[in-house]
Image: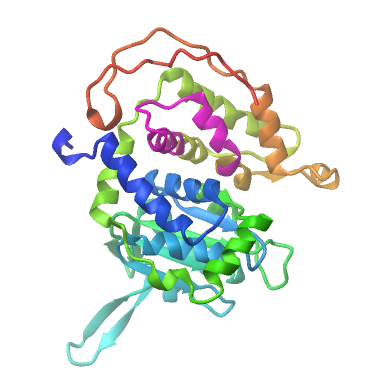
Amino acid sequence: MTTYDDRANLNDLTATVERVRGSVEGVIEGKPEVVRLALTVLLAEGHLLIEDVPGVGKTMLAKALARSIDCSVRRIQFTPDLLPSDITGVSIWDQQRRDFEFKPGAIFAQIVIGDEINRASPKTQSALLESMEERQVTIDGQTYELPSPFMVVATQNPVEMEGTYPLPEAQRDRFMARVSVGYPSVEAELQMLDVHGGVSPLEDLQPVAHAHEIVKLIEAVRGVHVAEPVRRYAVELVAATRTHPDLRLGASPRATLHLLRAAKASAALAGREYALPDDVQALAVAVLAHRLLPTAQAQLNRRTAEQVVLEILQHTPVPTAQAPAPQNGFGGLGRTVPAYPQQPPRSL
């Protein structure tokens, strides 16, 4: 059982996250919301999918996040000829010992960068399924635990681009959130020319947090209080995707769990010991949209999954305020936290 002394408090989390955020934003100019989402997924024990056109800094974001934390990092360049054993590892016959010896693959790291993941075949992509969900790898009947913290940051090009394979539904569902970096503003692009015009800032990037600090912060985020109305609100949002007429595949129960975990991490990043419906609303598109499959008619009408999620947010009632109730707050501090803070409901 984790005690208070073993957990980080709110001040520790804020200071550490600000250091990591400042380090990453020194490389990725003009995208603070993208950096914040990446940190939210990290503290929520999830995996991040970065999807956008080439050249907007997808891999740069993943590498900046990895280098800002003092932990093991491996990069996998996904190509059509990549094999599952290149990711998970393989058993090789040792002539001297006259026995098989396991050679770990690139997945055995705390932060794994999967570059252009949808350029590999679905067979190779599926090699990540067990590791992303269960944080372990099974080879020849032997199970190997992965280190903690463990996070997969994958980049992919839009499916319409040549030489890409769409990610299987089971693979997409294991990513907690999907983010699009997007083109920078004119000012940010001008600043990028000054910063990146000579030497890449990644070369001088030094770790600003240790892996054991991140583990403690993850433990602290688990202690963020989520009132029953907020949990029910998250469940109703996800359930609405399963009955929407424009969707042929809704979000899974895993999506509900990911949405709740991300909301807790978002609340912690905001310095709160409790999650609000605002946290759920702000993350709904990033957490849910990539899991949804529009119907053929919706695609003909150019209806996107993001538009459907926004429509669901508009039509799902926001929980109303309740009287305060004593609960254990952030990181097990034991302070009284309202069951739902006294704020008026709002809709997007």
Quick one: 52 or 134, which is closer to the camera?
A: 52
Which span is picked out in magenta?
261-286
Where in the figure is residue 102, as x and y percent of width and height? 28, 76
Where in the figure is residue 122, as x and y percent of width and height? 58, 66
* Residue drawn at (52%, 48%) of the image: 32
Q: Is residue 1 magenta?
A: no
Q: Is residue 282 magenta?
A: yes
* Residue drawn at (22%, 22%) of the image: 334
Relative vertical location of residue 338 with respect to residue 305 in this rendering, above or below:
above
| 268 with respect to 60 (left or right) | left
For the rendered model, the colour scheme is: rainbow
Quarter of the image containing the N terminus?
A: top left
Quarter of the image containing the C terminus?
A: top right
| 332 with respect to 284 (left or right) | left
* Residue drawn at (37%, 45%) of the image: 43
Where in the figure is residue 253, as x and y percent of width and height? 50, 36
Quick one: 278 or 256, which is closer to the camera?
A: 278
Can residue 297 be seen by looking at this rendering? yes
Considering every residue shown, the one lying at the far bottom of the view is 95
Relative vertical location of residue 148 with respect to residue 43 in this rendering, above or below:
below
> How many numbered tags mark residues here?
0
Can residue 182 be seen by looking at this rendering? no
Relative vertical location of residue 40 with respect to residue 280 in this rendering, above or below:
below
Where in the figure is residue 242, as x and y percent of width and height? 64, 33
* Residue drawn at (33%, 37%) of the image: 221
